[in-house]
Image: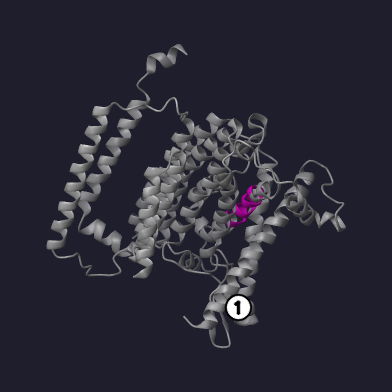
């Protein structure tokens, strides 16, 4: 690999990292504004025009607050927990195709950090690793509410990972590849996978809510029963990392859903647009469309949070094991039969 | 090659920590790190699929369940079982026999031809799937039946106490 290629990759990684952080930051602002809209309030409006500087003020507060490590906690693991949460949230973006290859001065620049041929499984692995941050932090706090939150997180993630994996299997039957780059290419124009896998998409969506611990699946931090759940004992930026990791996870899972089911950077009429605006602006418009889809999904996450109340814990387990898993298996069987008959 | 030796050193280092850690939760955390080094070994051997499956299944699911169970158990010093002397001697004897068996099997491994991969791309998903579903279809399906029977057994154990449940 040449030096220029390494520099391009490095720049791309930095840009993606910054974009995820900024989007996560402004998701907190968007969440509060959307919540205010749903509840007929104004929302944050003091810091800067329309409260636009509110995330910076929150971040400053988080950094400057006193750092408390409880006496009976395990200090090292208490710090490892939030670090692991934010780490696993950030590394998921490495395999997502952010746009088509750009050609600048005869040089092909892929807008994807790495196109490994097990891309979906990599995402899946990172998601399954994400629960360790919550578990280690909850256990190290040495608090029974934290421990209960951690245990809930573990059982919830494992239960919903199964149906998520099964819904991905049905998608793989359609696409025939595990590489996210190829899956995005296959959905050229309007051939989006959601048209072939509507049930799979709904299953994946529900599981994504459960994996990111968003309402109605936010049982690990259920404040009506568990004080603050796994982050009861956390303060200052360590708490900030947990909250931040949730928003980054939301952004990454929106990007994954947009790539897998909603065509990624593809949109109807993209060939016509690309022929008219040139080889540099064309892929950039595709990237803009991709981000528009991501923002729609993030809005949907927030919309659901402020519309649907939280599940009871037994309802959560019933939904996961008795409804989603049989549905996912039926989806695989039907998809397999249809594909065999059509070929 | 130096990468391999470094990762191999880490694997052995973390596995020693697994058995020497006083706190069971810490030893599970070291076990997670050990499995992570195994994942790196698979990647070094260009077996991407095995690497990621090891990552998902062992690190992401089985060890989460281990950790889950250990967190629920009350692990105080008082509840630690004290083994009788005879049991300790039996354990040392059994361990010694296992070590002899392992060493002898390693010795016989050196005599036979080392496994040379005909296809260095074998570890990629496409090739591995083709091999599994063409050459090794029967063992593959039989092992799935084995897993199913284990699952049925677990369900049976979990639903054994029906009468006591009704009284609650």
Q: x%, y% of residue A44?
A: 82, 49
Seen at 82% across and 42% down, the residue is A40
- Looking at the rendered structure, the number of numbered marks drawn on it comes to 1
Residue closest to the eye, A12 or A136: A136
Chosen colour scheme: one colour
Main secondary structure along the magenta-highlighted residues: helix
Q: Which residue is mark 1?
A: A274
Q: Chain of mark 1?
A: A
* Residue A199 visible, this angle: yes
Q: Secondary structure at mark 1?
A: helix
Bounds of the magenta segment: A242-253
Residue farthest along the top direction in this orientation? B167
Residue closest to the eye, A200 or A52: A52
Q: x%, y% of residue A293?
A: 63, 60
Q: Looking at the picture, does residue B49 appear above or below residue B83?
A: below
Seen at 83% across and 54% down, the residue is A51
Q: Looking at the picture, does residue A147 appear above or below residue A13?
A: above
Residue A246 belongs to magenta span: yes
Seen at 54% across and 85% down, the residue is A107
User: Where the N terminus of chain B falls, by quadrant?
Assistant: bottom left
Q: x%, y% of residue A160?
A: 49, 42
Seen at 66% across and 56% down, the residue is A296
Where on the picture, by quarter, is residue A339?
Answer: bottom left
Residue closest to the eye, A110 or A63: A63
* Residue A173 visible, this angle: no
Where on the picture, by quarter, is residue A137?
Answer: top right
Residue farthest along the bottom direction in this orientation? A105
Residue farthest along the front direction in this orientation? B85
Q: x%, y% of residue A315?
A: 54, 31
Residue A317 belongs to magenta span: no
Q: Residues within 10 Å of mark 1 (few under 14, many from 20)?
A: some
Asked if residue A67 lies left or right of residue B166, the reply is: right
């Amino acid at each position: 690999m040449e030096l220029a290629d390494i520099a391009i990759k490095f720049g791309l990684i930095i840009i993606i990292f910054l974009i995820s952080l900024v989007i996560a930051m402004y998701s907190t602002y968007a969440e509060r504004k959307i919540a205010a809209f749903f509840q007929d309030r104004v929302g944050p409006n003091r810091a800067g025009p329309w409260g636009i500087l509110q995330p910076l003020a929150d971040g400053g507060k988080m950094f400057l607050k006193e750092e408390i490590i409880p006496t009976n906690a395990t200090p090292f693991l208490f710090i490892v927990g939030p670090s692991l949460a934010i780490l696993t949230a950030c590394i998921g973006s490495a395999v997502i195709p952010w746009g088509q290859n750009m050609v600048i001065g005869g040089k092909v620049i892929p807008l994807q950090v790495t196109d490994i041929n097990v891309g979906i499984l990599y995402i899946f692995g990172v998601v399954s690793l994400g629960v360790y941050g919550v578990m280690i932090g909850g256990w190290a706090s040495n608090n029974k509410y934290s421990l209960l939150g951690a245990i809930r997180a573990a059982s919830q993630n494992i239960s919903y990972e199964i149906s998520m994996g099964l819904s991905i299997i049905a998608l793989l039957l359609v696409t025939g590849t595990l590489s996210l780059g190829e899956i995005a290419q296959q959905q050229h124009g309007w051939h989006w996978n959601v048209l072939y896998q509507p049930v799979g998409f709904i299953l994946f969506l529900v599981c994504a809510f459960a994996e990111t611990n968003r309402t109605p699946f936010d049982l690990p931090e259920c404040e009506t029963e568990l004080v603050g759940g796994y982050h009861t004992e956390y303060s200052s930026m360590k708490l900030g990392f947990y909250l931040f990791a949730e928003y980054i996870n939301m952004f990454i899972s929106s990007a994954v859903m947009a790539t897998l089911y909603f065509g990624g950077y593809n949109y109807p009429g993209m060939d016509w647009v690309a022929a008219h605006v040139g080889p540099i602006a064309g892929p950039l418009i595709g990237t803009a469309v991709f981000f528009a889809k991501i923002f729609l999904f993030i809005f949907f996450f927030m919309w659901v949070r402020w519309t649907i109340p939280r599940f009871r814990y037994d309802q959560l387990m019933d939904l996961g094991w008795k409804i989603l898993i049989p549905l996912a298996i039926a989806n695989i069987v039907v998809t397999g039969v249809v594909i065999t008959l059509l070929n | 090659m130096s990468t391999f030796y470094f990762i191999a050193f880490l694997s052995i280092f973390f596995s020693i920590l697994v058995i020497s850690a006083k706190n069971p939760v810490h030893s599970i955390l070291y076990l997670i790190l050990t499995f992570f080094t195994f994942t790196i070994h698979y990647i070094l051997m260009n077996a991407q699929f095995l690497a990621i499956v090891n990552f998902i299944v062992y690190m992401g699911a089985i060890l989460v369940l281990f950790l889950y169970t250990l967190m629920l158990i009350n692990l105080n010093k008082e509840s630690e079982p004290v083994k009788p002397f005879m049991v300790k001697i039996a354990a040392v004897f059994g361990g010694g026999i296992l070590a002899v068996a392992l060493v002898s099997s390693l010795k016989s491994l050196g005599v036979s031809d080392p496994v040379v991969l005909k296809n260095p791309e074998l570890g990629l998903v496409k090739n591995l799937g083709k091999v599994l579903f063409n050459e090794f279809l029967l063992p593959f399906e039989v092992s799935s039946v084995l897993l199913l029977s284990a699952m049925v057994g677990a369900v049976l154990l979990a639903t054994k106490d029906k009468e006591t449940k009704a009284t609650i």
